[in-house]
Image (tube, rainbow, N blue to C red):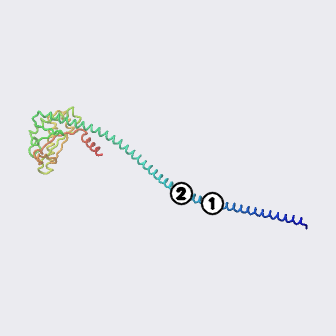
């Protein structure tokens, strides 16, 4: 081989060696780039994975918080439901109470109206009684009977010594004369046209002192009251007209009280003489009923 041939062969060998080195360098560089890229990608992946893990943990924490909040909200909802039921029950009670209060208010109004009505009637009755008391006083003021009319009740009391002997139940002549003077004026006032419709009862009531046994005195008081009534209501009497007699008979009642209602003196001792008596009193129509009704209504 000539020198030219050897040189060409050497140059070709040198060229391929340089090209091979270059390719090896490029391959190494490429491998390094790929390794770096892979490493970088791995780092990024690990970082993303850590981030995802952190997010998962954060989401778990948030999920736990949301679950706790859900449970709290559910508990509050239960409490709210309980409160709503309690309010509904309370509302029903209030409605019932309001209804009851309304009914009671209406009843109270009706009772008040009834009380006002009965009070008006009672005031009228009290007014009538006051007028009757005054009329009785005027009737007997100028008489010689010395009759005292009770200012409150209109009752008239007769000392038994005027009408009877001691422990007796038969009217004396003096007693009959006294009643003959008293009775026409009394009947004229109570059973005259002005007041007749107001009178429900005229009561003749006998009383004794506290001496002796109760039953003896009860019989004596009854017999004395009966003797007075017999004289006043007898068909043979000439004191009253037939109309007056009929009117008196329709309302008169007779009773004896024994010594159950004695008269006391200023020292608190039983006045034996004053206790032996016969009383004439009167009741007005509806008087007791109205008083009892007002007492009942006032106690409600």
In the figure, 241 relative to 65: above or below?
Answer: above
Q: Residue furthest right?
A: 1
Q: Which residue is mark 2?
A: 65
Answer yes or no: is residue 184 visible. no
Q: Which residue is mark 1?
A: 47
Looking at the rendered structure, the secondary structure element under dot 2 is helix
Q: How crowded is the residue under tag 2: few (<14 C-alpha within 10 Å), some, or many (20+)?
A: few
Residue 172 x/y as whole percent:
9, 40
Say the numbered circle drawn on residue 297. none
Residue 220 x/y as whole percent:
13, 46
Looking at the rendered structure, the secondary structure element under dot 1 is helix
Between 118 and 56, the one lying in front of the other is 56
In the rendered picture of this protein, how many numbered marks are placed on residues? Answer: 2
Q: Residue furthest front?
A: 3
Who's the residue at 48% across and 54% down the image?
A: 76
Image quadrant occupied by the N terminus: bottom right
Whichever of callouts 2 and 1 sits on the residue coming sooner in the sequence is 1
Residue 38 x/y as whole percent:
69, 61
Instruction: Describe residue 13's horizontal placement relative to residue 121 as left or right.
Output: right
Residue 83 x/y as whole percent:
45, 51
Who's the residue at 78% across and 64% down the image?
A: 21
Who's the residue at 29% across and 40% down the image?
A: 115
Answer yes or no: is residue 192 visible. yes
Image quadrant occupied by the C terminus: top left
Task: Please tell me in which quadrant of the rendered image residue 18 appears.
Answer: bottom right
Instruction: Describe residue 97's horizontal placement relative to residue 275 as left or right.
Output: right
In the figure, 148 relative to 18: above or below?
Answer: above
Mark 2 vs 1: CB contact within 8 A: no
Q: How crowded is the residue under tag 1: few (<14 C-alpha within 10 Å), some, or many (20+)?
A: few
In front: label 2 or label 1: 1
Q: CA distance from mark 2 to mark 1?
A: 26 Å
């Amino acid at each position: 081989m000539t020198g030219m041939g050897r040189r060409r062969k050497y140059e070709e060998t040198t060229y391929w060696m340089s090209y091979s080195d270059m390719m090896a360098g490029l391959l190494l560089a490429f491998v390094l780039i790929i390794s770096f890229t892979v490493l970088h990608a791995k780092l990024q992946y690990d970082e993303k994975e850590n981030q995802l893990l952190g997010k998962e943990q954060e989401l778990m924490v948030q999920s736990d918080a949301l679950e706790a909040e859900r449970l709290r909200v559910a508990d509050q909802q239960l409490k709210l439901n309980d409160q709503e039921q309690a309010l509904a029950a309370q509302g029903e009670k209030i409605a019932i109470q309001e209804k009851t209060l309304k009914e009671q208010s209406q009843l109270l109004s009706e009772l008040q109206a009834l009380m006002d009505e009965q009070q008006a009637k009672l005031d009228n009755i009290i007014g009538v009684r006051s007028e009757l008391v005054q009329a009785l006083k005027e009737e007997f003021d100028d008489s010689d009977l010395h009759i005292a009319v009770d200012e409150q009740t209109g009752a008239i009391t007769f000392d038994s010594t005027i009408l009877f002997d001691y422990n007796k139940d038969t009217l004396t002549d003096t007693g009959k004369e006294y009643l003959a003077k008293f009775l026409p004026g009394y009947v004229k006032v109570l059973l005259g046209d002005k007041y007749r419709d107001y009178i429900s009862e005229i009561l003749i009531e006998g009383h004794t002192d506290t001496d002796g046994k109760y039953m003896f005195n009860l019989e004596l008081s009854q017999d004395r009251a009966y003797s007075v009534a017999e004289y006043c209501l007898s068909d043979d009497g000439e004191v009253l007209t037939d109309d007056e007699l009929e009117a008196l008979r329709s309302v008169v009642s007779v009773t004896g009280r024994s010594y159950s209602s004695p008269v006391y003196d200023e020292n608190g001792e039983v006045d034996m003489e004053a206790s032996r008596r016969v009383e004439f009193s009167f009741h007005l129509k509806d008087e007791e009923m109205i008083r009892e009704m007002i007492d009942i209504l006032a106690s409600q």
